[in-house]
Image: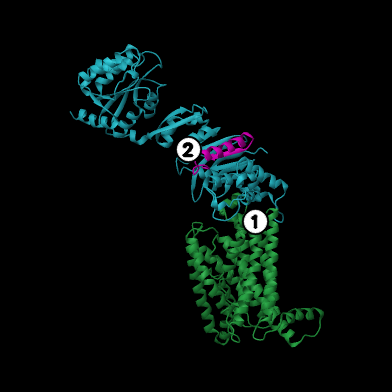
Chain colours: A cyan, B green
């Protein structure tokens, strides 16, 4: 049976509304992921259906009928819930535990029938819990118990499944197992509303995402539309790199730091970081956290350092990937180097495309304010020796050499103190 | 329950029933004047055939058997109420005596006794007043122990004790005011089954049947509610309705027991707990098994109370408290260590 779950201008909460005027539809065959900061009201949306949260205005309907019009038992035939955790301090067997999921289908005077046993068996098979049948629930691990709870929910043969951070207590293996089962069921026509607190999991398993924030649903769309740098900054207050999972192709979020850190009024000094291929990502983060105002040399958008710099909102000279820096690019970097308080150059693979950065620093004549981090070994030199020459000339004209980021911060303090 | 589970349940219940029959015959045979088990069965047979009874058989029929039957019914009432309260509060320490329900029923019954009366009114007024007292008490204790929808074990026990003391004080007040009824009421309150009549047996039997018919139909809900109210609701249980029905049923059977036998503690605590340890938490088996075990425990406790210092009789409440108090302490310690219900 295909049934949608729909929120229409719904205001929901407990003593007072937690979310106001939200509209959302979860259609059969899709997983809709709810993400958002803690306390924003994700669970409230779920509990508006499962019971516990109050509807102040608007409507919440399951299959075109308001949730409040259903009796508990009618609702349990359509909607199942997988909570975060289930208390398990009693000596029921795993089989008895899953059979409780059939309550809504069994008559008061009767016992489980063939159809009920079939549904229980199917649910346990899907969740891989057949082997646990005879085990006592209070002796199982959290992972096994959560899979059993999923089996219990599936034994209800629901049309709508609600998940409230269903895997936050599970290890990676069980997490994937539970969500894979849910995904398969959604592909088979189940409507799934899931609260996620892991954004990568949300992106990977959801067809659409909705962000719950500030008492509403400001953003809805596909994971790629929703999980943007702007959303993460505005709604989660986090600077993050948005990438693509190389295997599943889903959106991947790499949080770098809290946005607030970036918004400090006073800085300890302006620092230009020259790096590439990921050599400078950690340094940018470190210097930003330490309170420096960081800018970058020429970087392509495909470069790891370029992505991190963008996520952190750092100023950089953007260049085309795999194309040599132009004279204009070099001039721009030179100008920047002259204007900042210090320059940090990381040992980076240098080739025709980014050698201009080194030339620019040498040309700017700021060696006495330059810190070189690491050693430019021959393996990093793709410029037939020119990078090494430039590096050495900086050393000879007064650039300081450091081993790592911590060392760099100390040396920068000295340089800036001068 | 699977097929093996059903067979096991049937076996357990038959075994308990057989033990109960033996306990009842023993209870009727022993006493200040011992009679033989043959006299017991003979008395029943003769009564059924309408033949005149021998003196020994008359003793059995008029004094011993009503007392044994009443003991069995009272035990069944207390134990089944214990199971129901324990399921409802998800707490193995819940018992009509500890929750103060017995005291509430006691105050109701004491008021009815103090009012006096004769005939049917004297028989029916105490249990009815006890029912009102029991129901009001459990609602009060539960609401006192609940903060923001959560009922803590400690709060529940404290609320039970506090309410129980207050009610006991009120009962004493009734005694002082109605001095002429004092000895009768005090004797009843100490918990005893002296002077049991077939009329009382009939009344308690009817109340037990009426009180338990519905909980038996709710056994599956009681199982599911062990997962917590919210989860039970998600699985389709109308939790509030089940609670109302079960509280009313449990209070009805408690008041039946209290109105004829006074305050008898710990039977409602020990028996369900022992049954749960042996049989597991499934109320479809636990409830009938507790009814039978409660009956057995009470018949044996009453027998012990009659013969241990014969011809002096101990109030049976003393016997159950002596046996049950240590069990309660053991349970409390065990629960603090986070054991399963």
Q: Which residue is mark 1?
A: B220
Q: Which residue is mark 2?
A: A198
User: On screen, B219 above or below B31?
Assistant: above
Q: Residues within 10 Å of mark 2 (few under 14, many from 20)?
A: few
Residue displayed at 69% across by 47% down: A117
Boundaries of the magenta span: A165-194
Q: Quadrant of residue B259?
A: bottom right
Q: Tag 2, which chain?
A: A
Residue B70, position as x, y percentages in the image: 66, 76
Q: Is residue A111 magenta?
A: no
- Res. A84 in view: no
Circle number at residue B282:
none
Q: Nearer the viewer, residue B37 or B75?
A: B37
User: On screen, A330 above or below B172?
Assistant: above
Spatial CA span between label 1 and label 2: 36 Å
Dot 1 falls on a residue whose secondary structure is: helix
Q: Is residue A186 magenta?
A: yes
Q: Tag 1, which chain?
A: B
Q: Residues within 10 Å of mark 1 (few under 14, many from 20)?
A: some
């Amino acid at each position: 049976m295909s049934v949608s779950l729909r929120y229409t201008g719904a205001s929901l909460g407990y003593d007072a509304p937690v979310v106001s005027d939200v509209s959302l539809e979860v259609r059969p065959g899709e997983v809709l992921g709810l993400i958002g900061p803690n306390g924003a009201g994700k669970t409230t949306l779920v509990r508006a259906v499962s019971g516990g949260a109050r509807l102040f205005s608007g409507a919440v309907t399951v299959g075109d009928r308001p949730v409040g019009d259903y009796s508990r038992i009618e609702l349990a035939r359509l909607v199942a819930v997988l909570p975060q955790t289930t208390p398990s301090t009693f000596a029921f067997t795993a089989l008895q535990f899953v059979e409780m999921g059939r309550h809504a289908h069994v008559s008061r005077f009767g016992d489980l029938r063939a159809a009920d046993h079939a549904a229980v068996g199917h649910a346990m098979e899907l969740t891989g819990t057949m082997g646990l049948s005879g085990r006592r629930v209070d002796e199982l691990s959290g992972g096994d118990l959560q899979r059993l709870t999923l089996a219990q929910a599936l034994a209800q043969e629901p049309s709508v499944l609600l998940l409230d951070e269903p895997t936050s207590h599970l290890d990676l293996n069980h997490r994937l197992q539970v969500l894979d089962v849910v995904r398969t069921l959604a592909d088979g026509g189940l409507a799934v509303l899931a609260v996620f607190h892991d954004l990568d999991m949300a992106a990977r398993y959801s067809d659409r995402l909705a962000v719950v924030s500030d008492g509403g649903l400001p953003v809805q769309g596909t994971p790629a539309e929703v999980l943007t740098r702007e959303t993460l900054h505005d709604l989660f207050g986090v600077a993050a790199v948005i990438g693509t999972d190389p295997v599943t192709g889903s959106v991947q979020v790499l949080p770098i730091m809290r946005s607030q850190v970036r918004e400090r009024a006073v800085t300890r000094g302006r620092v230009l970081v020259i790096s590439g291929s990921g050599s400078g990502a950690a340094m940018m983060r470190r210097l930003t956290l330490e309170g420096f105002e960081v800018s970058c040399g020429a970087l392509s958008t495909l470069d790891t350092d370029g992505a991190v710099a963008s996520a952190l909102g750092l100023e950089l000279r953007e260049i085309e990937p795999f194309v040599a820096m132009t004279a204009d690019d070099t001039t721009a970097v030179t100008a920047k180097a002259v204007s900042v308080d210090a320059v940090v150059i990381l040992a980076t693979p240098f080739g025709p495309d980014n050698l201009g950065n080194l030339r620019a620093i040498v040309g700017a004549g700021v060696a006495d304010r330059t810190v070189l981090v690491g050693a430019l070994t021959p393996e990093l030199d793709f410029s037939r020796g020119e990078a090494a020459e430039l590096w050495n000339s900086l050393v000879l004209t007064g650039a300081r050499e450091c081993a790592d980021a911590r060392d760099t911060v100390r040396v920068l303090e000295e340089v800036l103190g001068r | 329950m699977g097929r093996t589970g059903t067979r096991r349940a049937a076996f357990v219940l038959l075994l308990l029933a057989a033990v109960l029959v033996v306990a009842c015959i023993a209870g009727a045979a022993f006493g200040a004047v011992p009679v033989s088990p043959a006299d017991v069965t003979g008395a029943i047979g003769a009564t059924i055939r309408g033949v005149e009874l021998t003196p020994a058989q008359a003793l059995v029929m008029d004094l011993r058997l009503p007392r044994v039957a009443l003991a069995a019914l009272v035990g069944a009432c207390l134990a089944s109420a214990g199971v129901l309260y324990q399921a409802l509060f998800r707490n193995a320490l819940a018992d009509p005596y500890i929750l103060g329900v017995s005291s509430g029923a006691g105050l109701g019954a004491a008021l009815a006794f103090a009012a006096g009366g004769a005939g049917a009114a004297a028989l029916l007024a105490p249990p009815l007043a006890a029912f009102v007292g029991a129901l009001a008490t459990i609602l009060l204790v539960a609401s006192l122990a609940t903060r923001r929808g959560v009922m803590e074990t400690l709060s529940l026990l404290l609320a039970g004790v506090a309410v129980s003391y207050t009610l006991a004080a009120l009962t004493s007040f009734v005694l002082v005011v109605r001095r002429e009824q004092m000895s009768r009421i005090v004797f009843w309150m100490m918990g005893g089954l002296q002077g049991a009549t077939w009329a009382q047996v009939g009344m308690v039997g009817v109340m037990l049947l009426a009180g338990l018919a519905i909980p038996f139909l709710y056994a599956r809900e009681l199982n599911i509610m062990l997962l917590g109210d919210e989860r039970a609701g998600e699985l389709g249980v109308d939790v509030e309705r089940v609670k109302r029905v079960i509280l009313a049923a449990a209070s009805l059977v408690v008041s039946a027991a209290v109105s004829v036998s006074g305050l008898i503690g710990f039977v409602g605590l020990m028996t369900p707990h022992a049954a749960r340890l042996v049989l597991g938490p499934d109320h479809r088996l636990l409830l009938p098994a507790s009814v039978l075990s409660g009956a057995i425990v009470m018949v044996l406790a009453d027998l012990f109370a009659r013969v241990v210092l014969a011809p002096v009789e101990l109030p049976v409440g003393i016997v159950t408290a002596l046996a049950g108090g240590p069990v309660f302490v053991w349970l409390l310690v065990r629960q603090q260590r986070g054991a399963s219900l």
